[in-house]
Image (cartoon, rainbow, N blue to C red):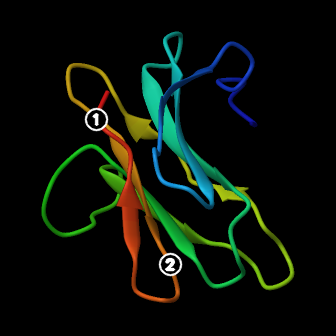
Amino acid sequence: MSTGCDHQARTVRRSAEIGPLIELRYSARCRAAWVRVTHARGGDRIEARNRSGACRPRSCYTRTVASGHSSTYTAMVNDKGVKAWGCLYRRNGNIVCTEGY
């Protein structure tokens, strides 16, 4: 939010699963993507990525839904010339991801 990238951002991918809604948000002006989750449970973790493999700074950001809350969002990953996607890691072990954009 501090960068202003959220002002003209749009949701480009959503999870197709029933339950928490995982959205991949994209800002053309900033050439960046991030993940937002709603209707989740405290302890669930979301991840925004633009590269496979180990989670590394600037190519993967995670955020855990705080206890007593049901939504959160990650930091932005670069989306210039690469695909980004988001995943939700549920406390029960289930994983749900968006398609890449």
Question: Tags 1 and 2 in contact by the CB under 8 Å rule?
Answer: no
User: In terms of secondary structure, where does tag 1 sit?
Assistant: loop
The residue furthest front is 18
Q: CA distance from mark 1 to mark 2?
A: 20 Å
Name the spot of residue 96 as percent of width and height, x first.
Answer: 40, 61
Disc 2 residue crowd, few under 14, some 14–19, many 20+, Cα 10 Å: some
Name the spot of residue 37 as percent of width and height, x first.
Answer: 64, 54
Q: Is residue 72 left or right of residue 13?
A: right
The residue furthest right is 68
Residue occupied by mark 1: 100
Residue occupied by mark 2: 90
Classify 70 as above or below 18: below
Query: Mark 1 vs mark 2: which is more N-terminal?
Result: 2
Which residue is drawn at the image coordinates 68% and 73% (left, top)? Answer: 65
Amino acid type, label 2: Arg
Disc 1 residue crowd, few under 14, some 14–19, many 20+, Cα 10 Å: some
Q: Is residue 87 left or right of residue 101?
A: right
The residue furthest left is 53
Figure quadrant of the C terminus: top left
Which residue is drawn at the image coordinates 51% and 41% (left, top)? Answer: 34
Amino acid type, label 1: Gly
The image quarter containing residue 53 is bottom left
User: In terms of secondary structure, where does tag 2 sit?
Assistant: loop
Which residue is drawn at the image coordinates 68% and 12% (left, top)? Answer: 8
Total labels drawn: 2
The residue furthest bottom is 92
Name the spot of residue 7 as percent of width and height, x first.
Answer: 75, 18
Name the spot of residue 2 as percent of width and height, x first.
Answer: 75, 36
Which residue is drawn at the image coordinates 74% and 36% (left, top)? Answer: 1
Classify 48 as above or below 82: below
